[in-house]
Image (cartoon, helix red, strand yellow):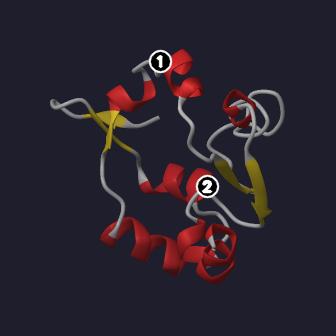
Amino acid sequence: MGKITIDNKIILPFEIFRELFIGDVELEKAKEVYDNFWSPCCVASHYDKVPLKTFESLSIPRSIIYASTDNPLPVGEYGWHPKFSNRLNIYRFTELPGSHEVLFSNPQKLTECII
C-alpha cells in the first residue's frame, strides 16, 4: 500500500492518496495538494494506544466533524462514525459532504462546521 521509511513514516503513493483521501476534487487539484502539502505520516500514530479511561474522565467538550465521503476506512461499523465517535460518549456531531482532505475541497463548509 505505502512505503515505510527508515524513521517509521508512511509515504502513500499518489494513486492511493487520490482515491482514498481526496477523491472529491479535480485531478490537478489533487496533484497540487499531494505535491505541496502531503507529508509522510508517523506509523506510531496508528498503533499507539490511547488511555481511554483517562480520556473519558476529562471534562472537555468533544466534537466530531464527519466528512461523508472520507474513504480511508470503510463506511459503516468499522468506519469513522459510529465506531470511533461513539468512544467519546457525549459529543457534538456535525456532518458535511467531502473527503478526508475536505479542507482543500470545501473549506467554507468546514469552517462553518468548526464554528
Image spot of residue 90 (x, y percent): 75, 38
Q: Amino acid at mark 1?
A: Pro
Front residue of 62 and 107: 62
Residue tagged by mark 1? 51
Left or right, 37 with respect to 95, comes to: left
Residue tagged by mark 2? 19
The image quadrant that residue 103 belongs to is bottom right
Front residue of 71 and 51: 51
Q: What number of labels is visible?
A: 2
Image spot of residue 78 (x, y percent): 74, 28
Secondary structure type for disc 1: loop
Front residue of 67 and 38: 67
Point out the residue furthest to the left here: 6
* 6 vs 72: above or below: above
Image spot of residue 33 (x, y percent): 42, 71
Distance from the alpha carbon under mark 2 to that under mark 1: 32 Å
Image spot of residue 89 (x, y percent): 73, 31
Asked whether residue 68 appears in the rendered view, the answer is no
Name the residue located 82 percent from the left edge and 28 percent from the top edge.
77
Secondary structure type for disc 2: helix
Disc 2 crowd, CA 10 A, few/some/many (<14, 14-19, 20+): some
Name the residue located 58 percent from the left edge and 63 percent from the top edge.
22
Q: Are marks 2 and 1 in contact (CB under 8 Å)?
A: no
Tell me the tag on residue 5. Answer: none
Disc 1 crowd, CA 10 A, few/some/many (<14, 14-19, 20+): few
